Amino acid sequence: MRKTQKSKGAPKKRLGIRGKVSAHPYKSDRKKFSSGRKAKLGTCSVVSSGRMNRNHYMSVTGLEFSYGEVQVLHGLEFELPAQSVCCVMGRNGVGKTTFLRNIVGLEKPSAGSVLIGGTEFLGLDASDRAVRGIGYVPQGRQIFPLLTVEENLSVGLEAAPPDQRQIPTAVYDTFPVLYDMRKRRGGDLSGGQQQQLAIGRALTTRPKLLVLDEPTEGIQSNVITMIGEIIRNLVAQEGMTILLVEQYLDFVRSYGDSFAVMSRGQFVVSGRVEDLDSNTVHKHLSV
Ligand SMILES: Nc1ncnc2c1ncn2[C@@H]1O[C@H](COP(=O)(O)OP(=O)(O)O)[C@@H](O)[C@H]1O
Ligand SMILES: [Mg+2]
């Protein structure tokens, strides 16, 4: 395992993950937002120190997972700095979604440890993990098309104690469109609005760790910018820790603090996003 080296003087090309100029409509607009300053909190190191670092929100060691006979995660080692945005990258099918599902408790690993704040989370199911502060925005959003926006948000609260099952006003403050459309069915929303709904649903339980799987997939550039800014605000203002899978380098570079690249069920390289150079991209991410 190695850290990336800083490539001094290298031209800052905007690369899509396939190693060419990104066809993605998103262009960084981040400088406009003062609250979006990046924290200086280290990287999501792929090499575990073997003990809980107090700056690490989560430490994963030796995580193994198989779908039936097919092993997908091969002894993952991963450390996530607190109050920062870590972006997991990698080609299709390497195990990124499977990794996130193991973190949020939707899959059970066959071996390993997931320490969060010094507590072992492996024995907890997904709803227990939600109660203990993990919010999850799945790939493809997975909202309920026939339920109203309000009902979709309430689904996120089912794991919460009965006296805390009100949709927090902060969710509507963050996503005003969800308030305007609260009586509409989820399936009637645009893709960008559905992604806001999926994030809003994850925020109803006021998580400490927000896990997002490809939040920009199929989303228009203005909504992508908004999502990026909201993520930065959640870190800066709520002290949240963000773990996201992301395919687009522009987004990672604009809103991430650190990155970790997965290949064939293992993390192979990590570092600060400013050190994510084109060599790393071509070696591990280009097809
Ligand atoms: N429910 C499942 N049953 C069997 N195999 C699966 C299942 N989900 C994913 N896989 C396989 O596991 C591997 C990793 O998938 P996934 O974690 O979705 O990758 P990524 O998110 O990096 O694209 C792939 O080979 C995929 O085909
Ligand atoms: Mg995936």
Image (cartoon, rainbow, N blue to C red):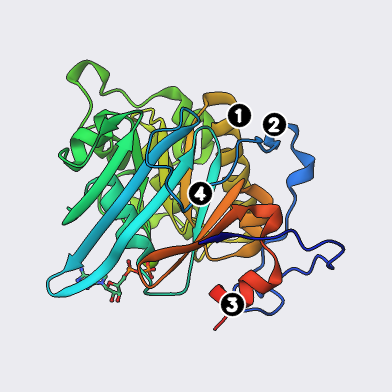
Q: Amino acid at mark 3?
A: Lys
Crowd band around label 4 with a 10 angstrom C-alpha radius: few (<14), some (14–19), many (20+): many
Q: Is residue 108 left or right of residue 97?
A: left
> For mark 3, what is the residue?
283
**In the rendering, at what x and y percent does residue 278 appear?**
70, 71
**In the rendering, at what x and y percent does residue 112 appear?**
24, 50
Q: Nearer the viewer, residue 284 or 225?
A: 284
Q: Is residue 199 left or right of residue 235?
A: left
- Asked if disc 4 and disc 1 are in contact, CB closer than 8 Å, the reply is no
> For mark 4, what is the residue?
45
CA gap, disc 1 to disc 3? 33 Å
Q: Amino acid at mark 2?
A: Ser
> For mark 1, what is the residue?
236
Residue at (19%, 37%) from the top-left corner? 127
Q: Secondary structure at mark 3?
A: helix
The mark closer to the camera, 4 or 2, is 4
Q: Amino acid at mark 1?
A: Ala
Q: Secondary structure at mark 2?
A: helix
CA gap, disc 3 to disc 2? 34 Å
> For mark 2, what is the residue?
35
